[in-house]
Image (cartoon, rainbow, N blue to C red):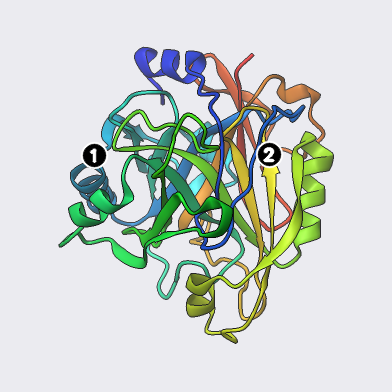
Amino acid sequence: MVHDRERRRLVLGSLAVPFAAAGFPGIAMTQTTKTASTLRRIKMATVAGNDLDAMESWYTEWLGYKVAERGRVSAPLAASWGAPANAGRPYILFAPAGGGDVYIRGVEIDAVPGYRAMTTFGWNAIEIIIDDVYALRKQLEGAPFRIIGEPHSLGGGFASIHAMQVIGPSEEVLYLTCETGDREKSTLPIPSSFVDRPFIMVLAGPDLEAMGEFYVDKFAMGRIPNFYSSVGVLIDALGIDPDHKFPLGLLRAAERGNNIEIDEYPPPATVRPRPAGQLPPGVAMTTFSVADLDALTVGYITPPATHYGSLRSATFVGPAGELTELIEEG
């Protein structure tokens, strides 16, 4: 699936940068030291939808991403995801214009009628570090992205961090976050391009403690104490009491600027529908790099194998039903 040039990028690249905030209003956490987590960093966010042409057009024209690779999913790789019906379906690998080896991957699936972002359990959003959220907002005038959160300051002690939220062609939510103050002193990653790489993945489930304990127990992730916040975009999506406070948390990977935000969704949130034998729609999967797949105690869908050139990978189903892929970068 990955050609020699891209395989080298998958193996060799490493972004270890200061970290800061989640994209929801009022949420900001700081990571000042590396953790002992066996999850090293976010490697790739996978978005599944039935119109890859739209995804390519939106991401390249409006966000400035480059197509790093395109092809068809191999049968062994699809089986490793627990999605055998994705074998032979097209994929596109998108990279930020500034380079690096952290990607967003689009994979074709059949349409899932009625699926709506932020209403189901699993991976729900990709937070991306950008250079200037207000310039990007102007650039997105007339764009097909659905804007669900206008640029705003996170307020309080993090007033210099500004973010907006949009929904893409496959009902994937993108948080677009920037530092408007002194970037050398900021806890955010420093972008290498106008729209750069994912640095937080947002996971939703019915039980915050179950999600947090799983990733701490299995991967020794650092954990920020839980907190509560009123999240307007979630309240709107779920149609719930506008005063609802969501239990939220943050899990830290080994390298700075690589984190999982965990959100507890109340009813009517439910299990995500998916086409038979295929990836779930929207933000379908997150890929992390690890040192040794055999040293981990998770139950893989299929045994680790060399799905990415000489690199082994394997995928497991997490406590919220999420698909998490691990690539061994020894």
Residue at position x 58%, y 36% in the image: 258
Q: Is residue 242 above or below residue 89?
A: below
Q: Is residue 70 left or right of residue 129?
A: left
Q: Can you identify the residue that label 2 sits on?
A: 252
Residue 127 place in picture, x, y as percent? 47, 48
Residue 216's disc number: none
Q: Is residue 298 above or below residue 124?
A: above
Who is closer to the viewer here, 242 or 174? 242
Residue at position x 50%, y 74% in the image: 232
Residue 117 place in picture, x, y as percent? 46, 67
Q: Number of numbered discs present?
A: 2
**Element marked by disc 2:** strand
Mark sitting earlier along the chain (2/1): 1
Q: Is residue 298 left or right of residue 315?
A: right
Give the amino acid at mark 1. Gly
Q: Can you identify the residue that label 1 sits on?
A: 64
Does the image show residue 318? yes
Give the amino acid at mark 2. Arg
Circles 2, 1 touching at the beta carbon (< 8 Å): no
Residue at position x 26%, y 44% in the image: 63
Who is closer to the viewer here, 182 or 206? 182
> Badge 2, how many Cα within 10 Å: few under 14, some, many 20+?
many
Residue 216 place in picture, x, y as percent? 80, 42
Determine which quarter of the picture holds residue 119. bottom right
User: Which quadrant does the N terminus fall into?
Assistant: top left
